[in-house]
Amino acid sequence: MNRILLKNIFHLVTMNSSGDRINGVDILIEDNRIKRIGSDISSNGTETIDCSTKLVIPGLVNSHHHLFQTFQRNIPPVQNAHLFEWLTNLYEIWKYMDEETVYYSTLLGCAELLKTGCTTTTDHHYLYPLAFQSDIPQLQMETAAQIGIRFAPTRGSMSRGKSKGGLPPDSIIQSEDDILTQSEEAIRKYHDPSPLSMRQIHLAPCSPFSVTTELLKETAQLARKYNVRLHTHLCETLDEEDYCLEKYNMRPLALMESVDWLGDDVWYAHGIYFNDDELNLLAQTGTGIAHCPTSNMRLGSGIARVPEMLKLGIPVGLAVDGSASNDSSDMVGEMRNALLLHRVHAGADAMSAPQVLEMATKQSASLLGRTDIGTIEEGKAADIAIFELDRLEYTGALSDPLAALVFSGINHQADMTIVNGAVLVKEGRLTSVDEREIIENGNRISRHMLERAGIL
Ligand SMILES: [Zn+2]
């Protein structure tokens, strides 16, 4: 039996329903669960980790990503582009994706997430180039299992290419029959609904401007048949709103309502341009939002009305979004940006440190339909992030250790990240993969893709 004792924790943030934050407590992990939280738990030969200078929080949960984008960070031609221009340029690079790209980009993105205390991530892979015949969900599932992160990706899709009035080139889209058949196959093969599951899969047509309403409707039926969730981008820019008004004579959320995409099994990425009635509709139906503040700032997309969403009880999780618009998978950085962005917009009391941590843990978990992760409680998954506070950058910040993590710091690296009872980051280094190998292969692949696209 695997047992780990976290001893004498300087500050524990549980995120349980009473919001308990405890000093000087111990946590016993047994196999993949949190067995006990209490004072003076005896070690009895158990592997013991001294946490007397450490902040311990639930493992962070990332609710939106495009791992395949990790090799297209800060590409010069689109560094200063708005969403539609950014997308049309990047499609011309992404079409050169191959098996190795999917493998190393998944590994790289998950590695960064783990190093910043993230223990569960989703992914939204929506590119299925015609020339690429491999089973992408399988490749991603195997890669996530290799590094050890808890993985709940979506099976993305695009079916409306340029020739049908969509944005992407026809060479990277699929037929709707293929999308539905392969989505069903992916659910059957990879969705494990059991408690503490390490792999689940949900369905995610890319956006209203890259699929048809028929596909949205049929995807919703398929997801509900198998009790998996629905995800897509919505209300990210005014260009998207204009597209929906022009093409369908409906605002984006009305369009989604018309294809049965409202409910507590649906979560949208971004959600910037909702009006008051639409926010009320989201609240009434329990429809969730993955908030991506860095991406929204980076692309100049706008500011989501998150403080109002939280007041209305809309489930709002936090997410890094893809690395072509962030340009990193830094979950602590994302918390800090969420805190600061809403203060710029609505004042210093618009967003607090506990609120951003709640979005990054149990709220993100709820978007993925999980109650077994996102909090530190007995019986829950042993998914824990540990940060060393005995550092220069936190000196003078210890009157509120949770706030220290979000307000202070020069490096968002976790000292230790535990997923499903396994230590995947130790003293800031990954234990399950070779970091050097990822760096060398990642740079090689990125360079090769840019050369093929004529950018380098
Ligand atoms: Zn996205």
Image: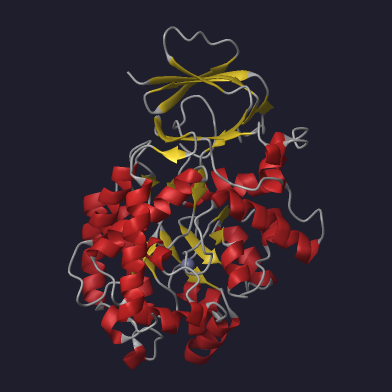
Residue 179: horizontal and vertical position, in percent?
A: 26, 71
Answer yes or no: is residue 369 visible: no
Residue positioned most to the left: 133
Position of residue 102 measured from the top left corner of the image (x, y, whole percent): 29, 62
Q: Is residue 8 left or right of residue 148?
A: right
Instruction: Please provide percent x and percent y for residue 366.
Output: 51, 47
Label count reads 0
Residue 181 visible in the displayed image: yes
Residue 405, above or below 226: above
* Residue drawn at point x = 23 percent, y = 55 percent: 138
Residue 242 falls left or right of residue 304: left
Question: Where is residue 62 shown, x and y percent of the image?
Answer: 49, 52
The residue at the point 36 percent across, 49 percent down is 436
In the rendered structure, the answer to whether residue 248 lies left or right of residue 180 reads right
Residue toward you, 194 or 434: 434
Answer left or right for 155 relative to 114: left
Choose top left, top right, bottom left or bottom right for residue 22: top right
- Quadrant of the image containing the C terminus: bottom left
* Front position in the image: 308 or 426: 426
Q: Quadrant of the N terminus?
A: top left
Residue 296 against residue 433 in the figure, above or below: below
